[in-house]
Structures are given as structure tokens and as C-alpha cells.
Image: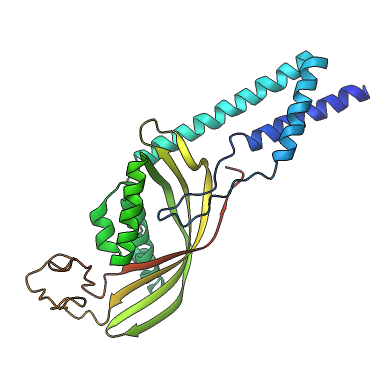
């Protein structure tokens, strides 16, 4: 009786261990490659022991060993099915923005900043260069441009699905030469992973684990909604130019008080849910 109880406990241990460590993947992806790619290998030594005991069960107690293997296979299939569902949802997801009027007056600017962040993430995900250009400074745009070109060469695509706003606060705000700089700490959650565009297999990140990101986002905008008639970079006239890009030097124009342009994105911390 005592020996049977030990075997039962061992089976439960094996099932739980394989369910939590199956298909270990790289953590995070994040547009611009701000997230880390460390491998979660905390249970690697336990995996070796678990495999030994599984072999032992199959030899000494075939019915129990087979039962454990069947359960592991079912868990693996369930995880695989969930990942495929999330990938399909991410590929077909549409951009939905928050309504700033639903928030208090002191939060509207931060909500607007989140909407810009989300626009950029969706543009990154869909190789929408124009939207990235309209919402970032030249330095950030050039960085995105190079990284997106690299993804294309590798037949890869970064999917960021179900992006949710979790909170924010203004860290810093100052003005210089008619341009206001706003630094915002922002917390978001999303599924974040990179797939191969030829077969939709996940190559980086984990499609079934929800990521939690804490960013420091920097935005710039003009002061007092003043009209700009010359390009701040090259001095070219902007009259009749309805675009957000200078016709001559192709730099991004910060046109009015309500137009925030992201100039910097810094990852402060990240984690992912182990219960997803």
C-alpha cells in the first residue's frame, strides 16, 4: 500500500512537471527588440530526473508509465492547440484604441500616449512603414526600418496580440525651443512572439504566455499648438504641405499640440504569466 502511494505521488509529480515545462521558449519579443530573450531553464535538472523516473515507470509498472505518457501527450496537444488559436487571433486582430474622454482630465494625455504606442506596435506587426514614420522621430523610425528589414529577410513577423493598458504616470515634463518633452512610465500586457511567415511556427517568444511590460516612453510635441511654417531640421518652407514629413529632408514634422511623436522607448522590466 505504501509503495503504491509513492508511485501515485511520483506520477502526479511527473504530470505537473511536464505540463509546466513543456515546450520551453524564449521570453518575450517586443517590437524594437527591447525585451530580453533569456531561456527559462530553471527546471532543466528536474527534467532529467523526471525522464529517468518515467523510463523506470514504463519498465517496472507499464500501466502507470503508459498512463503518465498519455496524460503528457494530451497536455502537450492542449498547449499546442491554444498556441495555434492565439496565433490565428493575432494574425487577424484589428487595431482598437482607447477613448481618452472615458478617462479623467489628468489622464487623457497618458491615454493618448498609449494609443500612439499601440499604433506603432500594430504598424510594426504589419510592416506598416508609413504609420511608424508618422508617429516616431527620425532616429526611432530608422531603427525600426532596419529591424523590420531584418525580419523580412529572415521570413519572420513579430505578433503582439491583445495589447492592454494597465496604468501609467508622467515621470518628467519639460520644454525647450518650443518643443515639449514628456516622459511616461507605462505598464501594458500582451502576447508577444515571433513567427516564421512561411509556416506560422513560433521562433521566438511564447505564444501561450501573457507578457507584462513596464516601459519608459518619451514623447515630444510642439507648445501652444503653434503652426509651424518651416522645417525645424532643414529650414525648408512647409506652406501647402499637409504631410507630417518634410518634402526636402524627409524628417518628421511635429505639427500641433495634439500630435505626440514617440522619440524613445525603454524597457524598465518584464515578466510573463506562468499560469497562462
Q: Give coordinates of residue 149: x percent, y percent.
A: 31, 48
9 horizontally vs 222: left or right: right
Q: Do we see residue 169 in this rendering?
A: yes
Residue that extends furthest to the left in the rendered view of this protein: 240
Residue that extends furthest to the right in the rendered view of this protein: 2
Q: Give coordinates of residue 10: x percent, y percent.
A: 80, 29
85 horizontally vs 5: left or right: left
Q: Is residue 11 above or below residue 213?
A: above
Q: Give coordinates of residue 71: x percent, y percent.
A: 66, 23
Pick the front one: 145 or 7: 145
Pick the front one: 40 or 75: 40
Q: Residue at x 15, y 78 (%)?
A: 235
Quadrant of residue 201 within the rendered picture: top left
Q: Where is the N terminus found, in terms of image quarters? A: top right
Q: Residue at x 53, y 50 (%)?
A: 37
Quadrant of residue 46 within the rendered picture: top right
Q: Where is the C terminus found, in terms of image quarters? A: top right
Amino acid at each position: 500500500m505504501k509503495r503504491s502511494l509513492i508511485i501515485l505521488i511520483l506520477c502526479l509529480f511527473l504530470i505537473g512537471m511536464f505540463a509546466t515545462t513543456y515546450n520551453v521558449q524564449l521570453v518575450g519579443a517586443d517590437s524594437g527588440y527591447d525585451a530580453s530573450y533569456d531561456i527559462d531553464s530553471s527546471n532543466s535538472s528536474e527534467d532529467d530526473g523526471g525522464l529517468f523516473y518515467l523510463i523506470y515507470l514504463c519498465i517496472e509498472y507499464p500501466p502507470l508509465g503508459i498512463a503518465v505518457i498519455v496524460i503528457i501527450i494530451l497536455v502537450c496537444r492542449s498547449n499546442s492547440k491554444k498556441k495555434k488559436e492565439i496565433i490565428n487571433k493575432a494574425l487577424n486582430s484589428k487595431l482598437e484604441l482607447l477613448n481618452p474622454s472615458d478617462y479623467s482630465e489628468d489622464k487623457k494625455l497618458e491615454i493618448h500616449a498609449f494609443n500612439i504606442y499601440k499604433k506603432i506596435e500594430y504598424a510594426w506587426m504589419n510592416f506598416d512603414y508609413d504609420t511608424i514614420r508618422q508617429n516616431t522621430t527620425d532616429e526611432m523610425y530608422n531603427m525600426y526600418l532596419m529591424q523590420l528589414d531584418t525580419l523580412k529577410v529572415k521570413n519572420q513577423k513579430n505578433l503582439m496580440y491583445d495589447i492592454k493598458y494597465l496604468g501609467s504616470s508622467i515621470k518628467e515634463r519639460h520644454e525647450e525651443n518650443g518643443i515639449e518633452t514628456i516622459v511616461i512610465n507605462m505598464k501594458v500586457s500582451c502576447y508577444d512572439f515571433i513567427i516564421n511567415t512561411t509556416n506560422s511556427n513560433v521562433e521566438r517568444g511564447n505564444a501561450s504566455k501573457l507578457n507584462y511590460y513596464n516601459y519608459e516612453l518619451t514623447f515630444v510635441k510642439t507648445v501652444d499648438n503653434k503652426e509651424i511654417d518651416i522645417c525645424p531640421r532643414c529650414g525648408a518652407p512647409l506652406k501647402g504641405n499637409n504631410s507630417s514629413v518634410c518634402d526636402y529632408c524627409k524628417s518628421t514634422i511635429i505639427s500641433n499640440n495634439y500630435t505626440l511623436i514617440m522619440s524613445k522607448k525603454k524597457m524598465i522590466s518584464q515578466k510573463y504569466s506562468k499560469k497562462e
